[in-house]
Image (spheres, coloured by chain):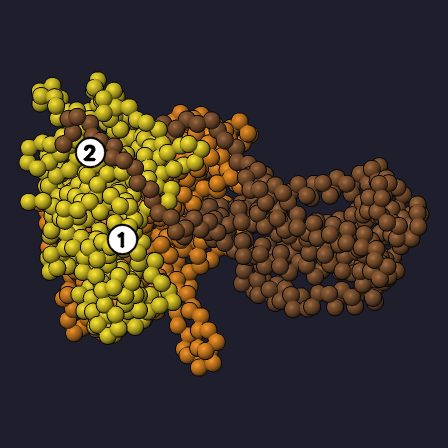
Chain colours: A yellow, B brown, C orange
Amino acid sequence: MSSLLELDDLHVWFDLGEGRELHAVQGVSLSLDAGQRLGLVGESGCGKTTTVLGLLGLLPPTASVSGRVVFNGKDILAGGEDSIRPHRWTDLAIVFQGAMNALNPVQTVSAQIVEALEVHGSASGRAARSRVGELLEAVGIPRDRGNRYPHEFSGGMRQRAAIAMALACNPSVLVADEPTTALDVMVQAQILELLDALCRDFGLALLLVTHDLPVVAQLCDRAAVMYAGEIVEQGPVDALFHDSRHPYTRLLFAATPDLHSDGALAAIPGAPPRLDRPLEGCPFHPRCDRVFSRCPHEHPALKRLDGDREAACHLNDVPAEVA
Amino acid sequence: MSVAVRQPGPVIEAEPIRSRRGIVWETIKRRPSAALGAGILLVVVVCAVLAPWIAPYDPHEQVGPVFGRPSWSHPLGLDDGGIDMLSLLMWGCRISLVVGFAATFVSMVIGGTIGLAAGYFGGRTDNVLMRITDYFLVIPDVPLMIVVAAIWGPSLFHIVIVIGILLWTSTARVIRAQVKSVRERVYVKRARALGAGHTRIVVRHVLPQVAPLLIANTVLTIAVAIFDETALAFLGLGDPSRISLGKVIENAFQRAAISTGAWWAIVPPGALVAVIILGCSLLGGAIEDALNPRLRVAHLSAKSFRLRPLVGRSPDAV
Amino acid sequence: MSANDRLLEVDELVVHYPVGRGIVGTMARRPRETVRAVDGVSFTLERGELLALVGESGCGKTTTAQTVLRLLEPVAGRISFHGDDITSLGQRELRPLRRRMQIVYQDPYESLDPRLTVRKAVEEPLVIHRAGGSKAERAELVQDALERVELSPPGLFLDRYPHELSGGQRQRVAIAAAIVLGPELLVADEPVSMLDVSVRAGVLALLDRLRRDGLGVLMITHDLSTAAHFADRIAVMYLGRIVEEGPAASVVSDPQHPYTKALLSVVPRRDPRERTRPQILRGEAPDAVRIPAGCRFHPRCPIAIDDCRRIDPALEPAGGSDHMAACILAG
């Protein structure tokens, strides 16, 4: 069965001027089935936000993109902006990072959702307003509050409003970029519960972009870990934690404090590599604790492993006793 | 509770240590408008400074008939006293620039201090100083200048003071806003927490952030000051013993240059004033733009991202 | 433990802000409202102890920390540093004290003056307080401080500007500048929340090491997992009050206050198999202007009873002698 959404070898370059380029996304391939939740995890600068902006065609003119974005069997990236636009919001919607702070301060929340509906030709007039009422209810905002302005809402409510806006045109895929990062832990729990319910009730596929591993562990079935513009490991969340096949994944989990476990916390020394120069070998090797002779010279390809997983690490080629 | 920790790692990319160049110089190098403005001002200032040596004739000496036409020996003709226009302009520049710079200096000192105090101390100080600023802002400049110049008597010194005390208000407001914003920055709060006194914080942390804006504002104020001086001189309120560009225009006007058709006596000085003001505006405006990151609106362009051919994958990839 | 070992003692601290009424409000004679940011907070901090002040936004933890350092003015209460009452000292008398109590801020990208090199930034406290002796001696103290924060070898960093360093490195520089004078108390306001995950443990371990060297650390954080790992004691704040306080392990494994219980239950776990049973509270904490009567948590409390509307509970021992909670139903 083919997936609902597939990214195939996506590359994004940013033009830095003076002939230099930043290779921000280096061959990312993902697939998302209907109703599935996939977490895209990584630290700052790894390319996860650029990847999802690329998939929605929301990159600036300084960016160039290659690869395929296949939605329902059709490559929507092939025609550039013109082939993506019809699908934006109606099939693929996004809650941006910091969306709750990007609401128009001089329009009521309802008006902004109506605008989304009208711009995409989904509804207008009375039909639009009634749909807005439905949406607000679905995200847990009392209907009558829709006539208030964003500054009258708390952070959590504004995030709900942003989610309502994203769902306005009934998309089948929802991308959420750091949806709970700026929120308190209790409000975060409310929003995660909401996303969970929405995915179940509306059969949404969710692509959750975040640096917060525990959030992914709680909400998603599968996750892809990104580093230096590439996916270094992908698979069921359970396997990533209990049986990781890439040192970065393992170390990232080990660096994340947990409420009830007392183990030593890891810190990964060094910093991610610069992406404006060609890299030799594995991008993670300078910081890896299991580095060996092959790593600085040969770039590890993302290989399929048992159990619907992939990892890009030479250690997976080496027999267990030697590694 | 043990933590496996190693060295924080090498510095981000051992690039050669770059010193922070002034924004002003960077702007001049990068933006053509700034370069043009700076160029114009440089030429004008150099000419004015070197006037005693490079002006072809003495500005008081009659070298030909009244309103003599432009010719090879007198490219800009002669004025109402038979004096060479080109030399007059060069000498006139001196006074105009001197008044412009001096008045701006006065206004910068007053405005900068008031803006700094209001922005830094806030509260009542801010309120009081801003009310004072408002009063001065509301006064119509030119009529007041006329009145004061008329009462006080025209002398260079008075003109400088009069212009200066009216121009400081916009500087004060701009500086105040900037100081307020810098004051809220974390490293300034940190300096206070460290125990730094006000002087130290202002001199070391606030002023360096405010200086580029002050420079931009100063350059723009020079334009206004020169304009004001020209206006005052044209109205006959300038110092009669000094030749400024405004005076040159006034003389020509008084002696019926227009009806005689002697355009060379009026247009060049006026154009020169305009050019100087243009230079200041270009330079000052460019610096201001460079300081304001939000003015970059590239993201609003209609173009979108570009597509590239497929890269292809490595042989043993998934 | 003699009184002198007690580094910091805070007693019934109160910090209120008046809320402006605006012209309409003044003309309509609306009653003046106050934000009761900190409404009666008491705790102690010993040398070599790390106390984590946790809570959600608006609970008053940052205000408390800043007031302890007298960067904000309290309306009532007492702050004692090494037994001396510093609550109403003037700014001039506080200056020498600033050498002994320092702060590290949340934002590593804004904490450092972009115009100063690392050397100047770490040297600045010494210059301000005219400490450290000659130029050469100061240079040595600066190098020392950089070594202590593991920016080693210091020579590599001294002439760098902040924009040439990573977030984690900048934060280390900020810590170096805070410890170069040899303070006894360090307030760390969300020291790692703006850093990448892989970098956080390093900086936190550094704070832990400094604590073991005798520094008292008051850490503000909203991240309970971090507090659980690194703090000796945790104090949970809600709407301007401490509602639970005790040894970290005890508070996390055996919470006594319903708010703490709810908070702990919604913290996501990193092991996917440990699916939590979250007790999600509805709505959000009310404004600190309109604090509910009785127990301030009662409107959102899952176990509130009638008495909770009338009684404002004080911190009482619950679940252990060192473990306190402000709830009539606790213990």
Residues at marks 1 and 2, common chain? yes
Residue in the foreground of this view, choosing between A25 and B68: B68
Chain designation of label 1: A
Judging by the rendered image, the residue that carries numbered circle 2 is A232
Q: Quadrant of the N terminus of chain B?
A: top left
Q: Is B162 rendered above or below residue C23?
A: above
Q: Residue at x 43, y 44 (%)?
A: C111
Q: Above or below — where is B65 with respect to C143? A: below
Answer whether labels 1 and 2 touch (C-beta < 8 Å).
Answer: no
- Nearer to us: label 1 or label 2: 1
In the figure, is residue A309 to the left or right of C242?
A: left
Q: Label 2 neighbourhood size at 10 Å, few (<14), some (14-19), many (20+)?
A: many
Assign a secondary structure to mark 2: strand
Q: Residue at x 24, y 55 (%)?
A: A86
Is residue B283 found left or right of A210 in the rendered image? Answer: right
Marks 1 and 2, Cα distance to the nearest angstrom?
A: 30 Å
Along the line of sight, which residue is nearer the eye, C311 or A188? A188
Question: Is residue A16 visible in this depiction of the protein?
Answer: yes
* Mark 1 or mark 2, earlier in chain: 1
Residue A146 sits above or below residue C204 on the image: below
Residue bearing the label numbered 1:
A85
Q: Position of residue C15 (x, y in %)?
A: 39, 62
Q: Is residue B1 visible?
A: no
Horizontal side of B202 relative to C16 (left or right) equals right
At x 11%, y 60%, the residue is A201
- The answer to which of B156 and A189 lies nearer the viewer is B156
Q: In the image, residue C329 lies at what x, y percent?
A: 15, 64
Q: Amino acid at mark 1?
A: Arg
Is residue B127 left or right of A215 when viewed as pictured?
A: right
x, y percent for residue C309: 21, 73
